């Protein structure tokens, strides 16, 4: 079904700016602003989640008679991203896209946050249309089940035959709804909400081949957008093996710079994930000096990146200093997220250390080697023996 949709649909390019400079004004109204404890909401917070998965408070607004207003100024080339209005209690939030223009949020009550209607700007309107497609599918399914009961009676519906009929109907309508949703996303491939929805809602259901096709449907204007890059990384991570391109992770370096793994294209990269509470990691870090001795005269060809899976910056710096790892072409990165690091998740690090050897075009040469084997492989490459081209997986 997906293959047919991708192959036959006429793609309509709807031009929605992926980034823009301007002011976003969010005007909200809560018809019933009483919280679960009976008190009224006094303040709400506008938040967003950064690429490291951390929630950032952007602005606050007072609530008066159920109304509130946020004003957010977007800088030049700031991408259109999804934010959340929080403060309703019980972890409830209203999701919306921040972009130039006036966004209206109409909420019937705190108890029915999920019924909030967001409108007024291109991406928010497109997202509302997408949700309407899903709602229409759910409504059609409910109507068909009701019609089935009207024809056959409640007793039959509760029988084995009736339950089987309901199951078939629900499966058929689920496929129809997902097909309509896919068609909508492909037709709106220039909207910033499209790669976000694909990643969050559809990616777990797609095979690797179809997921790759979905990535390829995204409009070229979005291909530097954070949501496109995140989606592409997830697809690469789901099919990570020798010979395939690896995800382009973020590298917060000890120097304070933030690099991307792709910044080192043109060089071989030895990427090492380590943690401070594992004896094997400690032994490996001590032996990394042997690797550095091999590559230090060939820094135009190789770079070593140690990625620390720790949460304490003090611990990280102590380990780097003790092992004398802060040298030219021997870089140290850490996002202070420990085992929850997005980079580690993309590389499938279930336990440290994990060493990945990456060639100049960003493809994996090996995914799991001990340090002695890494040294041997690097020496082979330096001698001109590009052994990995002979690996069946690499072809």
Image: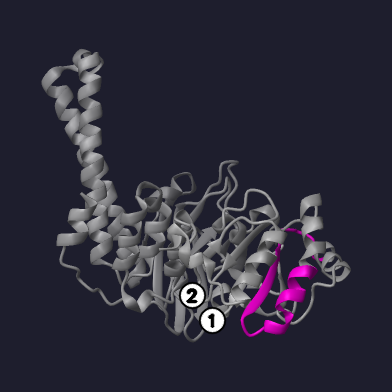
Q: What element carries label 1?
A: loop
Residue at x-position 58% and y-position 42%:
38
Q: In this view, does 304 lie to the left or right of 122?
A: right
Q: Please check the rendered image and state whether residue 311 is part of the magenta-colored stretch, yes or no.
A: yes
How crowded pointer 2 is (Cα within 10 Å; few <14, some 14-19, many 20+) is rated as some
Pick the front one: 323 or 335: 323
Residue at x-position 77% and y-position 51%:
280
Q: According to the image, label 2 marks what residue? A: 361
Q: Which of marks 1 and 2 is nearer the N terminus?
A: 1
Residue 109, percent from left and from top: 45, 48
Query: What span is in magenta?
Result: 289-313
Q: In this view, does 280 lie to the left or right of 395?
A: right
Pick the front one: 171 or 263: 263
Q: Is residue 338 left or right of residue 31?
A: right
Q: Is mark 2 on a helix, strand or loop?
A: loop
Mark 1 to mark 2: distance in Å? Answer: 6 Å
Q: Residue 379 carries which label?
A: none
Q: According to the image, label 1 marks what residue? A: 266
Residue at x-position 44% and y-position 55%:
239
């Amino acid at each position: 079904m997906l293959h047919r949709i991708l192959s036959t649909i006429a793609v309509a390019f709807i031009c929605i700016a992926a980034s823009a400079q301007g002011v976003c004004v969010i005007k909200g109204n809560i018809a019933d602003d009483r919280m679960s404890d009976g008190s009224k909401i006094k303040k709400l917070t506008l938040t967003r989640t950064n690429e490291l998965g951390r929630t950032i408070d952007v602005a606050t607004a007072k609530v008066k008679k159920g109304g509130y207003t946020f004003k957010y100024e977007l800088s030049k080339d700031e991408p259109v991203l999804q934010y959340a209005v929080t403060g309703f209690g019980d972890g409830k939030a209203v999701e919306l896209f921040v972009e130039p223009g006036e966004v209206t949020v109409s909420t019937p009550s705190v108890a029915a946050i999920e019924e909030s209607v967001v409108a007024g700007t291109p991406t928010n309107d497109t997202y509302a249309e997408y949700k309407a497609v899903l709602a229409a599918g759910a409504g059609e399914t409910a109507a068909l089940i009701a019609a089935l009961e009207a024809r056959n009676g409640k007793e039959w519906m509760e029988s084995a035959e009736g339950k089987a009929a309901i199951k078939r109907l629900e499966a058929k309508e689920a496929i129809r709804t997902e097909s309509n949703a896919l068609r909508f996303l492909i037709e709106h491939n220039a909207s910033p909400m499209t790669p976000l929805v694909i990643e969050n809602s559809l990616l777990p259901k797609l095979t690797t081949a179809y997921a790759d096709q979905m990535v390829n449907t995204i409009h070229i204007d979005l291909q530097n957008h954070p949501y496109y890059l995140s989606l592409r990384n997830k697809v690469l991570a789901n099919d990570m093996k020798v010979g395939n391109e690896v995800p382009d992770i973020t590298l917060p370096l000890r120097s304070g710079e933030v690099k991307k793994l792709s910044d080192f294209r043109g060089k071989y990269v030895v990427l090492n994930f380590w943690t401070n509470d594992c004896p094997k990691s400690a032994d490996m870090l001590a032996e990394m000096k042997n690797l550095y001795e091999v590559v230090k005269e060939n820094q135009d060809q190789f770079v070593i990146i140690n990625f620390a899976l720790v949460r304490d910056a003090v611990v990280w710096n102590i380990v780097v200093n003790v092992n004398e790892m802060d040298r030219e072409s021997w870089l140290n990165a850490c996002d202070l997220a420990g085992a929850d690091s997005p980079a580690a998740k993309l590389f499938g690090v279930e336990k440290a250390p994990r060493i990945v050897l990456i060639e100049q075009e960003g493809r994996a040469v090996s995914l799991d080697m001990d340090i002695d084997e890494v040294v041997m492989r690097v020496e082979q490459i330096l001698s001109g023996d590009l052994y990995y081209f002979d690996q069946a997986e690499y072809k």
